[in-house]
Image (tube, rainbow, N blue to C red):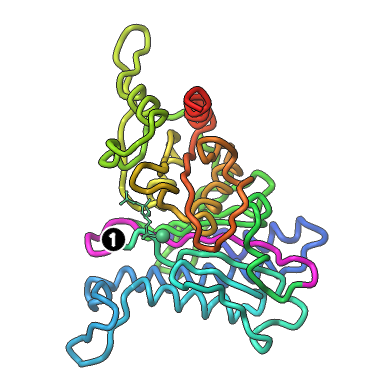
Amino acid sequence: MADHTQTNLITLSRHVLAEQRAHKNATGDLTLLLVSIQLGCKFVATCVRKAGIVNLTGLAGAENVQGEAQKKLDVLANEIFINSLRSSGKVAVMVSEEDEEIIVVGEQDRDGEHAHYAVVFDPLDGSSNIEAGVSIGTIFGIYKILPGSKGSTTDVLRPGREMVAAGYCMYGSSTSLVMSAGGGKVHGYTLDTTIGEFILTHPNIRIPSRGKIYSINEGNSVYWDEACKEYFGALKTREVNGKPAPYSARYVGSMVADVHRTILYGGIFAYPADKKSKSGKLRVLYECYPMAFLVEQAGGRASTGHARMLEYVPTKIHERSPIFLGSAEDVADLEACYAKHA
Ligand code: AHM
Ligand code: MG
């Protein structure tokens, strides 16, 4: 709840506008786009809060007591973001985890010459956690479309380092929106439900250079490669001054929550490739890249195990990749372990 003795709140819109003014060539288009994303996040946050009461957690196509068709929360979140982005007038093309094909925004919905952006997003990640009330989230990344393009697949099949902004919104005990438009700055905003605004609560987030937490689905360890087995095994048998100093294990199974904690507390989050999931599980465009972008901007490191995550060039919009991200020193140790096993 807002501290009502504090009357000069820095809302997300105010903050993004102030940052825009600091860039003399800024047109305001990215600001408008970010504002449309925050609207989507507020809408989804409200739906997540109500989900248990109004049966939004059921299967898509199920009917409620009034006989009205119910939408599953992830289907609803997808519609909310598509509508919000489309109505911004600034988006030429979108990729959503929920849609097989790219979504090219029609001429009539574009703002003339100003639809310069491509947005890739996972409207509701971690949906297996919904019914248990565990944190879930939205992940997004933004590219500027290529010169002369009106929006096509080539605008998004590009390395993640070309993104101009990225972020996530976590629907947890509070609603937290963390985003970066580059420049080594990552800011966190918390939704104040009493006034319906995201308030700047975590300016200039920096990830600790080393942490004490590892986050991976250990149930898959039987499928791991030798590098993974050695690296994560060593974190458990680690000693400092002759005394056991193991890392703690934390794994929500919801990427937004696991990455959020990793950014704030440090450590390493991983979803590796293994014998069962040959390319890992997480999707390059709207899961790996936005998180890698944020972690790098906050001073951390993100890797495929062999190379910088953001250098990778995808060939398909729903492609998957192994990913390791977090504190720079922890991820560097992991990469050294992979190099040793290469
Ligand atoms: P989803 O896009 O189907 O929700 O799956 C992505 C989620 C991530 O949030 C999380 O990091 C991962 O799946 C957990 O997978 P697992 O249950 O295999 O550990
Ligand atoms: Mg997902």
Residue 246 vs residue 264: left or right?
Answer: left
Amino acid type of the residue tagged 1 in the rendering: Ser
Residue 168 vs residue 150: left or right?
Answer: left
- Would residue 329 be seen by someone viewing this image from the given angle? no
Total numbered labels placed on residues in the image:
1
Which quadrant of the render holds ligand 2? bottom left
Q: Residue furthest top?
A: 242
Label 1, ligand 1: CB separation under 8 Å: yes
In the image, is residue 42 part of the stretch drawn in magenta? no
> Range of the magenta residues?
129-148
The percent coordinates of residue 192 (x first, y second) are 43, 63
Callout 1: helix, strand or loop? helix
Identify which residue, 63 or 311, lies in the foreground. Answer: 311
Residue at image location 50% in from the left, 69% down from the top:
96
Question: Split into 4 quadrants, where in the image is the N terminus?
Answer: bottom left
- Would residue 295 be seen by someone viewing this image from the given angle? yes
Q: Is residue 185 above or below residue 13?
A: above
Residue at image location 40% in from the left, 26% down from the top:
231
The percent coordinates of residue 303 (x first, y second) are 54, 39
In the image, is residue 130 part of the stretch drawn in magenta? yes
Residue at image location 23% in from the left, 77% down from the top:
55
Identify which residue, 284 or 315, lies in the foreground. Answer: 315
Residue 318 vs residue 270: left or right?
Answer: right
Residue matched to label 1: 128
Q: Residue furthest bottom?
A: 67
Q: Is residue 71 above or below residue 215?
A: below
The percent coordinates of residue 66 (x first, y second) are 20, 92
- Quadrant of residue 213 in the image? top left
